[in-house]
Image (spheres, helix red, strand yellow):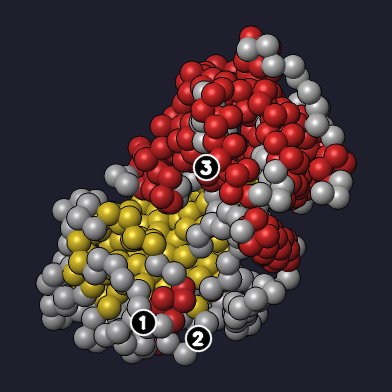
Amino acid sequence: MSDIRRSILWVIFAFSLVLLWDAWQVHNGRPKTFFPAPQDKPAVSAPATGAQPVAALPGAAPAVADAAAAPAIPRQTYVVSTDLLKLSFDSEGGSLIGVDLLKHHTTTGQSDPVRLLQQTDQHTYVAQTGLLGSAALPNHKVAMRLVGQARDLAEGQDSLSLRFESAPVGGVVLAKTYTLKRGAYDIAVKHEVINQGSAPVSPSLYLQLVRDGMTKDSGVPFASTFTGPAIYSDAAKFQKIKFEDIDKNKADFSKNANDGYVAMVQHHFASAWLLGAGIARENYAEKVPGGTLYRAGQKIELGAIAPGQSKAVEARLFVGPQEEKVLEQLAPGLELVKDYGWTTIVAKPLYWLLEKIHSIVRNWGWAIVLLVVVIKAAFYWLNANAYRSMAKMKAVNPRIQEMRERLKDKPQQMQQEMMRIYREEKVNPLGGCLPIVIQIPVFIALYTVLLASVEMRNAPWLGWITDLSSKDPFYILPVVLTLTTIVQTSLNPLPPDPMQAKMMWIMPLVFSVMFFSFPAGLVLYWITNNTLTILQQAHINRRMGVPLKITLPTQLFKKA
């Protein structure tokens, strides 16, 4: 029976190593060893003057007719900047085709801002709007002229506006006014539909986000992040839509609502169209026909507009980082684009506490350290019971080992004798496990909070750690983590079974090696947790009279 258990443990250990190797391959940009996922198709190269054309939505007609009779408007790109954003607008459709986040920099070059929206040969991610109807109307492909000049937000100026107007198409003029505010990532967008024709029109306004299916993960092993469309309504709540589900026509989301938003989500950043509550809208998320792009948006029926009349619709476009406090103020449910997954119920209070600590210490690294201290304090008595049980186990280990040597040829008698010793010494072999199991969801949630929080990007701690979201450039923290893991493991009682004892040493060391590629903030969290665990465990051992004995790993590999 002992040989069977030993064989099973070896199989589990070998399989764990295979999974670790596979995760390491994926982390380093190589395909999975087993069941590799199909590679994302590259976006079709855009023409020199813009991105790959996006086909009209169902019911839309091409913008021709009297637009062609109007004087030709040369296609241009207008660039303006605020204190937070650098934006590029295309005169074709008055679309937003580029957004640089000036306060957030790439991890490879601190001087380069993160470029969220862009339109290049390699990547397409833009925000478009236009009109649909039974006849030709101005859509996102129609030429538009800028009324006035494109200027940056000046010093002392709180807002600036850019107004784009189309020529009449089907007797209808579409005007878009973008209003940018200082200190804001949301842009007010006003659409004015002016009927200059001789008959009433009943157009629909669409607001959409268009991008290719290129995804980029968090780069952290065992912690994938979502990239793709998301739709929120008060009735259906937050619904993520995978690109592959769109490809398979399996996308499931709320199609009609009177509130909510449509977003494109990725790690740390998002964009979203925000309409006021009470406006009936039709949500959609689909692949652009005949291309490699995807679009997600909302369509609003504007009703009849008589000749000489106009109708205006106010909306907002958010393009920026997933800063939870900012998102909560912009729209109900918008903070959910910062996706904690199944840990949300625990992760949100942890982030709230982390943010409160940061408001005091003003350093995210020290905030992480203090947050772990608070959590360890909250679980102090639960951990104390576990460590007392471990101390008792360590105290009786010499008797267990002697008994195993003496009865190694009599496994049944060995088990009976072992249970007798545990009863006499009042030791519960599982007493150290239950408290740890209870805490696992809390620590996983904290791990998710640190991974999802954009505040960790480019956030310094001290000395050489200048970015808590990137790995330690000198690997000092991972080495310290490995040392604390060795010390912590040495304080735990060895399992009676030699195979289990070997695995107890090997597995923590394997995971410690993997932490060499983890973000510094996550490694700092584990170091703090390990250090506090060691201190508490040593304190309890000392109080119980159990000597602190370091078990050398080499002793575990002696031939039985």
> Between disc 2 and disc 3, whose residue precedes?
2
Q: Quadrant of residue 6?
A: bottom right
- How packed is label 3: few (under 14 Cα within 10 Å), some, or many (20 or more)? few
- Badge 2 amino acid: Gly
- Badge 1 amino acid: Asn
- In the image, is 26 to the left or to the right of 350? right
Which of labels 1 and 3 is toward the front? 3
Which of labels 2 and 3 is toward the front? 3
Residue 534 drawn at (x, y percent): 68, 23
- In the image, is 326 to the left or to the right of 472? left
Residue at horizontal 16 percent and vertical 53 percent from the top: 278
254 or 438: nearer the eye? 438
Q: Which residue is mark 2?
A: 291
- How packed is label 1: few (under 14 Cα within 10 Å), some, or many (20 or more)? few
> What distance separates the C-alpha of mark 2 from that of mark 3?
39 Å
Residue at horizontal 43 percent and vertical 45 percent from the top: 343
Instruction: State whether residue 408 is above or below residue 294.
Output: above
502 or 321: nearer the eye? 502
SS label for mark 3:
helix
- Tell me whether circle 1 and circle 3 mark residues in contact (CB < 8 Å): no
SS label for mark 2:
loop
Residue at horizontal 33 percent and vertical 55 percent from the top: 238
- Badge 3 amino acid: Ile
Exactly how many numbered labels are in the figure? 3
Instruction: State whether residue 335 is above or below residue 459.
Output: below
